[in-house]
Amino acid sequence: MEDIFTNRRSIRRFQDRPIDPNTLSEVLEAARMAPSWGNLQCWELVIVQAAADKKKLAELLSAKNPASKCMESAPVVIAVCGNPLKSGYYKEQQVTRYQHWFMYDLGLISENICLKACALGLGSVIVGSFDHKAAEELLHIPAGCELVSLLPVGYPDHAPAPPKRRALSDFVHYDRYTAS
Ligand SMILES: Cc1cc2nc3c(=O)[nH]c(=O)nc-3n(C[C@H](O)[C@H](O)[C@H](O)COP(=O)(O)O)c2cc1C
């Protein structure tokens, strides 16, 4: 198997080439299989393909965001949304010290999307910095659901060098946490 874990990169330039519906379905099937708190699957995905909508989304990123241009040029942008009061809650009561387990679940579904996209020769980037409120309004996200990230997906038009990763010895601790 190709090492999608090593080869996946954040892609911020895309070819002017559509994604055929079957390929997109494969990516979405992989998304569907992500693990989640209590298998509650708190997520909702909005598939944005209209040029005018992608342009409006692009305007909601700061010009300094390295993903601002590709928001418009990607053939598909997946808006990753979720209900913040399902994961980690039981009968509407928070049951662990953390309030935001939905973010964890949305991270997992996002990673499934990015890895499957990579396996199919597509590129993607997770975008978390933009005007969330305006994007929610644009995409008609209802109350009780929050738009967390935008994932432009398409055929890569560049091959970025891998950014540095920490060495395992720097963050893996055996038996007990040991300060380095
Ligand atoms: C939660 C999250 C939010 C991110 N937000 C942005 C963003 O707003 N703009 C952007 O260009 N990249 C964004 N990224 C991509 C990271 O910059 C990228 O994953 C990191 O630099 C490592 O590079 P790699 O994905 O190629 O391994 C985000 C990644 C994550 C996980």
Image: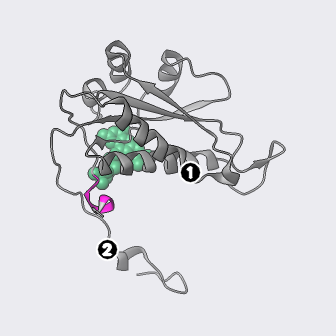
Q: Is mark 2 within 8 Å of ligand 1?
A: no
Identified by mark 1, the residue type is Tyr
* Residue at x 63%, y 30% (from the top left corner): 145
**Residue 70 x/y as whole percent:** 26, 30
- Which stretch is magenta? 4-8
* Location of residue 62 with respect to 82 vertically, above or below: above
Residue 140 visible, this orientation: yes
**Residue 12 x/y as whole percent:** 24, 38
Structural crowding at the residue carrying mark 1, measured as other residues with C-alpha within 10 Å and reported as few (<14), some (14–19) or many (≥20):
some
Q: Which mark is residue 48?
A: none
* Residue at x 48%, y 43% (from the top left corner): 29
Q: Nearer the viewer, residue 117 or 60?
A: 117
Q: Main secondary structure of the magenta part?
A: helix
Identified by mark 2, the residue type is Ala
* Location of residue 11 with respect to 136 vertically, above or below: below
Structural distance between the alpha carbons of marks 1 and 2: 24 Å
Q: Is residue 171 shown in magenta?
A: no
- Which residue is under mark 1? 104
**Residue 168 x/y as whole percent:** 36, 76
**Which element type, helix, strand or loop, lies under badge 2?**
loop
Q: Earlier in the sequence, mark 1 or mark 2?
A: 1
Using the rendered view, name the quadrant where residue 124 is placed.
top left
Quarter containing the N terminus: bottom left
Q: Residue furthest right?
A: 91
Q: Which mark is residue 167?
A: 2
